[in-house]
Image (spheres, rainbow, N blue to C red):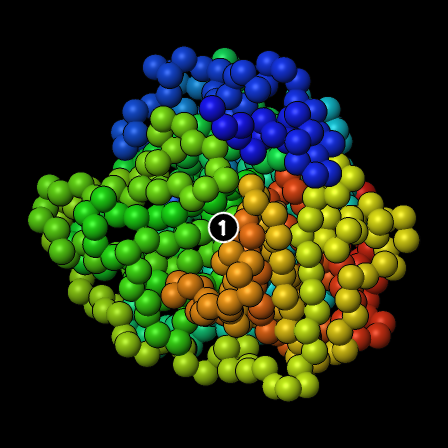
Amino acid sequence: MPLSRREMLAFGMISGGALLLPLERSVFAAGQSRLAESALPAPFTVPFSVPPVAMKVNSVGTTDYYSLTMREQATEILPGFQTRIWGYDGSFPGPTFDVQQGREVVVRQTNQLPHAHPTLGYTPFTSTHLHGSASLPQYDGYASDVTYPGSWKDYRYPNSQGCRTLWYHDHGVHHTAPNVYMGLAGMYRMHDSVEQSLSIPQGRYDVPLIVTDAMFDTRGQLLYDDDDQSGLFGDVILVNGRPWPVMKVERRKYRFRILNASISRTYRWRLDSGEPLVVIGTDAGLTAAPQSVPSLLHGNAERYEVIIDFAKYKIGRRVILRNVSPNNNVDYTHTGKVMAFDVVAQASTTSNNSIPSVLSPYNAIMGLTPTATTPTRKMALVRQGGQWTINGQTWADVEASAYTRALANPALNAVEIWEIRNDSGGWHHPLHIHLVDFKILDRQIDLSGIWVAARPHERGPKDVVHVGENERVRLITRFGPHPGRYMIHCHNLVHEDHDMMGQFTVGEGGYDPITTAPAQPLPAPEL
Ligand code: C2O
Ligand code: CU
Ligand code: CU
């Protein structure tokens, strides 16, 4: 039998693979729940729900104020078990924000988490990142700008970009994966007049699908096992914190904002009916035109807005969203299933029930094209010295340099091409660049030297790019609107923590991300 990638890593057979697995781990599947299979719900028996909506606590002029408390909470994920989670306001996942372009938002984040992780023992200091926002450095969730339990920090978000699906999640240095796994993640929808003038589904037909995977111990508690820093692959698929839920739908179109908030798992969505998925939005907003695809590869932290038309089915029909697992994931009995839709009624309204052929044709980033003088930088994603690195560098190197070391220093508003390379088999690296939106120019899918077009579903504004094994990707972006230091990292959060993260500096100066607006001890003044 050929050795798996993990077994080869375990025996040090892969270059730089200094990892050693304890023997029992190579015998027992790392990601499997220790509960009896009968204690897990059968797929498509738990009702679907969406997270609560975040409520503002105050408005002054064009600024809306919110306040979230990160705390531990017992919640029912598996029927009959109370699972301890860490949630924004105790919610798993966190409350969904609905904000309007042009209104500034301040979110007070108060850390009331316990002083130690229940099994890993570390102190959960946090740093909250609004992923998809061009925030100033001191509000960007810089990993080392931390808030300890008993402290608070106000984050300001400009909301001046176009409509998009953002998400907020913890970014605390070296503990991001377990913090997010415990529940510190939520969705943030930014609306604008372009989006609102389109006849696409809106309101209650605009539905968050936050997909994660998890494993549980014998008492129904979340089990954290990253397989010696390679990746975390659970056997239970959760949508909005519910295992393989079933949603009742009307015979009409729905818009799903799918967020892959899993720590390491990559998905490929497909409907069991064989009907296509129609992509209308990517990470950083609506696409120019809809793209109909039979299936859809979805890396960590990417967001895709997808329309499914249930008018094609009769009442009584069940449609299943499957995961045709891409390679380099660890699969279990039910990881090929995600959720089900039961068609139960005629459409109660048929307004906003279409897919216009033109969506958002004037995106500035999508209008960028390389010229003969556009500089190209290369970022190699490599395993080296027992660490995940970018160009051989880690966040520990950034820390050791007193946060000055940078992988790149583009001028403010410079347009550059970045070529991201994963020249190894066995791993995919979803690479995220903070601050900017980018356009994927092309890909090499097998190191053949031949560049091919971006995949149909990723031809929209992006901030994460899935770089599969032996792939290279070229993207183009403009570095702005703020000067300063911003992170770039793999969004397999286990890789990010150990330690595939660096920073780049835009222009000269800029606010210091750590010292400009540090967290303060409680009590906090009124908002
Ligand atoms: Cu979604 Cu640096 O993160
Ligand atoms: Cu980000
Ligand atoms: Cu990675």
Nearest the viewer among 362 and 148 is 362
From the top left corner, tell me how far across and down residue 451 is, in percent: 51, 68
The number of numbered discs placed on residues in the rendered structure image is: 1
Where does the image place residue 376, in percent across and percent down from the top left? 68, 73
Answer with left or right where residue 256 lies relative to residue 452. left
Q: Is residue 113 visible?
A: no
The structure residue drawn at horizontal position 18% and vertical position 62%, both measured from the top left corner, is 349
- In the rendered image of this protein, does residue 213 appear above or below residue 269? above
Q: In the figure, 311 relative to 159: above or below?
A: above
* Residue lying at 21% horizontally and 58% vertically, measured from the top left: 309
Q: Is residue 440 above or below residue 329?
A: below
Quarter location, residue 231: top right
Amino acid of disc 1: Gly
* Rendered view: 47 above or below 326: above
Q: Position of residue 280 (x, y in %)?
A: 36, 66
Q: Quadrant of residue 335?
A: top left
Question: Which residue is identified by label 1?
Answer: 299
Give the residue drawn at x 78%, y 39%.
385
Q: Name the residue at 79% across, 70% down.
A: 409
The secondary structure type at the circle numbered 1 is loop
Give the image location of residue 484, x and y in percent: 78, 68
Question: In front here: 243 or 52?
Answer: 243
210 horizontally vs 14: left or right: left
User: In the shown orientation, is residue 513 left or right of residue 436?
Assistant: right
